[in-house]
Structure formats: structure tokens, C-alpha cells
Amino acid sequence: MDSLPTAADLITRAERLVVLTGAGMSAESGVPTFRDALTGLWARYDAEALATPEAFERDPALVWGWYEWRRELVERVHPNAGHRAVARRDCTLITQNVDDLHERAGSKDVIHLHGSLFAPRCSACHQPAADVPGGTVEQEAADGAAIGVANRAAGGVADGAADRRAGEAAGGAVGEGGPRTPPACVYCASPVRPGVVWFGEQLPVAAFERAVEVAARADVLITVGTSGQVYPAAEIPQVTAKRGGAVIQVNPQPTPLDPFCAINLRGTAAEVLPEIIR
Ligand code: OAD
């Protein structure tokens, strides 16, 4: 990749660096991406069809069980060389991922646009459910204030075969899981739900506003491992490009964000990021 040195140079000289990450960032840690076909027990479900308020209403045990399976998988895997490279550099990190691998790699300034696997809350009264396993991360959305709605945009399906193999290798130790009844809220007895943003739900206001603000001021934004199909997150690199900042994309596949990028690096997060963030 001839453009690696140019990208490295731009990043070294950047005064306000922002990194936007998606599911591909964690693929080499063994976490399947959203567009990967699910395996085992979950093979007959589409990840997107499980990530909706309607799915939880229809079958709370199925959806809660799926998120618990993902939380347990994430707890057993480790940050990869890409997460570690980003953590070494002073930057603002915006992630669509609901795992905690950036924090575990040492990144300090992390904006979670789509919530967290570790912040369950009541589906009715929105109180954080800190006594649920893994449930301690601060949750902004208790007051329901939110902005932007997570939306699928039209587009193709990324080939996730390589990630799937990585996921099977690293995540194989986790059982297949299955439906589990969600715990009851200690305040109102309604079912507890995962603290993530589902399709059709609004993004946390403060997180999204800050993401747009830092993207607008960035002189360089690196977008890594996102298919650029889910809005409003996919707008963020476009904000930087329209304000005259340089967008560098790291993704083995082309994406709808390609035209907004000054440099497109076709490689994986764990291979490319240590090369360009020095
Ligand atoms: P996707 O699963 O849509 O896309 C993953 C992207 O990562 C694809 O473009 C792959 O080509 C790329 N990729 C795969 N392996 C990679 C690797 N090792 N290194 C770098 N890139 C790699 O994931 P997101 O774009 O994050 O939202 O999806 C966005 C949102 O859609 C998610 O946050 C979630 C989902 O449905 C909600 O749940 C609201």
C-alpha cells in the first residue's frame, strides 16, 4: 500500500486527531461483525433483526439471551494490535461498538454512539440495572433525551468470512448461549434490557453532539472497520471531509464512505493501524 507512509505522515502531524470505529475494529479480537452470518444456534437469526425494540417486545428472552452471549464472548477476548495502536495516541475516539475493548486497551476519551453491552437498564423506567452481571457502566439515556435515529441505509452486504473465521477461533470457548429470561427491574419489575441503541432508536444526545463537534474540528479523522451503512454514525466522516479535514479509511472492503476519504487503505485494523499510528 503506497499510501501508508502518506497516511502515517498526516497522522503524525495532526493536531486534532479523531478515530471512528465500527465492528471491523474488533473482528480480529474474535467478535463477529454485524454483517457476518451468525453461527451455531444463532445461525437462523439475522443480527439486525435481533437489534430492534420490536424484537425485544416480541421475545425478550431471545434478545436478552443473544446480548448475554455477546457480552460473555467479549469478556473472554482481548484488544488487538489495532486497539492498542489507537490507545497509544492522543485522540478522541468515537465508536459504534458496544464492547469495551478500546477502554481495555487504554483509550481514555471514548464516545460510545450505540451504547454498551455493560450498561443494562430497565425497559420501562430506564433506571440503570447495576446489579445485573456486567452492568455498571454509566448510562446517559435514563431521561430518554436522545438525538438522531439509528437507521439502515441502502447498500450491499460486506463479506465477513475472514472475521467469521477469527471469531470462531477466538470466540469458540464461549458456548452457544440461547434464550434467557431477562432479570426484573428492582424499581418497577419490568424486564431489564441491554443498554445498547437498537435500530429505530435515538442516539444519546450528548454523545452524538460531541462526536459531530470533534469531527468538525478534526484535521485528520481515521475511520476503521465500519460499513458506513448505518446513520447517523456514517455522517461523521463526511462532517470532517466537508470541513476540509483529511479522512483516512481502514477497511479490507470498499464502503460508501470511499468518496469522502483522502486515503483508502484496504487492510485490516490490526495490520494497518500499527503502521500508520506511530
Ligand atoms: P458492520 O458489521 O456493518 O461492518 C463491518 C465493517 O468492517 C465492514 O465494512 C467490513 O468490511 C469491515 N471489516 C471486517 N473485518 C475488518 C478488519 N479486520 N479490520 C477492519 N475492517 C474490517 O459494522 P458497523 O459499520 O460497525 O448498530 O455497523 C454499524 C452498526 O450497525 C452497529 O453499531 C450496529 C449495527 O447493526 C446498531 O445496533 C444500532
Image (cartoon, rainbow, N blue to C red):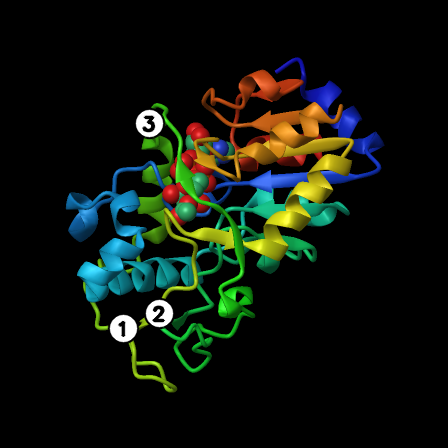
Q: Is residue 166 left or right of residue 203?
A: left
> Ligand 1 within 8 A of label 3's CB?
no
Residue shown at the point (36%, 27%) measured from the top left: 158
Q: Are marks 3 and 1 in contact (CB under 8 Å)?
A: no
**Can residue 17 be seen?**
yes
**Can residue 28 be seen?**
no
Q: Amino acid at mark 2?
A: Ser
User: Which image quarter holds the N terminus?
Assistant: top right
**Relative to residue 48, is residue 8 depicted above or below?**
above
Q: Amino acid at mark 1?
A: Pro
Residue 247 or residue 174, whichever sits in front: 247
Q: Is residue 58 left or right of residue 4?
A: left
Look at the numbered disc 1 and give the secondary structure of its residue.
Answer: loop
Disc marking residue 157: 3
Residue 49 or residue 53, whichever sits in front: 53
Q: Is residue 81 left or right of residue 12?
A: left
Question: Residue 50: horizontal and vertical position, in percent?
Answer: 26, 51
Q: Are marks 2 and 1 in contact (CB under 8 Å)?
A: yes
Query: How far is mark 3 from mark 1, CA to CA?
Result: 31 Å
User: Which image quarter holds the C terminus?
Assistant: top right
Residue shown at the point (18%, 49%) measured from the top left: 40
Q: Please tell me in which quadrant of the rendered image residue 10 appears.
A: top right
Q: Farthest residue in the bottom direction?
A: 186
Identify residue for label 2: 123
Question: Residue 136: horizontal and vertical position, in percent?
Answer: 51, 74
Query: How far is mark 2 from mark 1, CA to CA?
Result: 10 Å
Residue shown at the point (47%, 23%) measured from the top left: 255
Q: Quadrant of ligand 1?
A: top left
Identify residue for label 1: 182
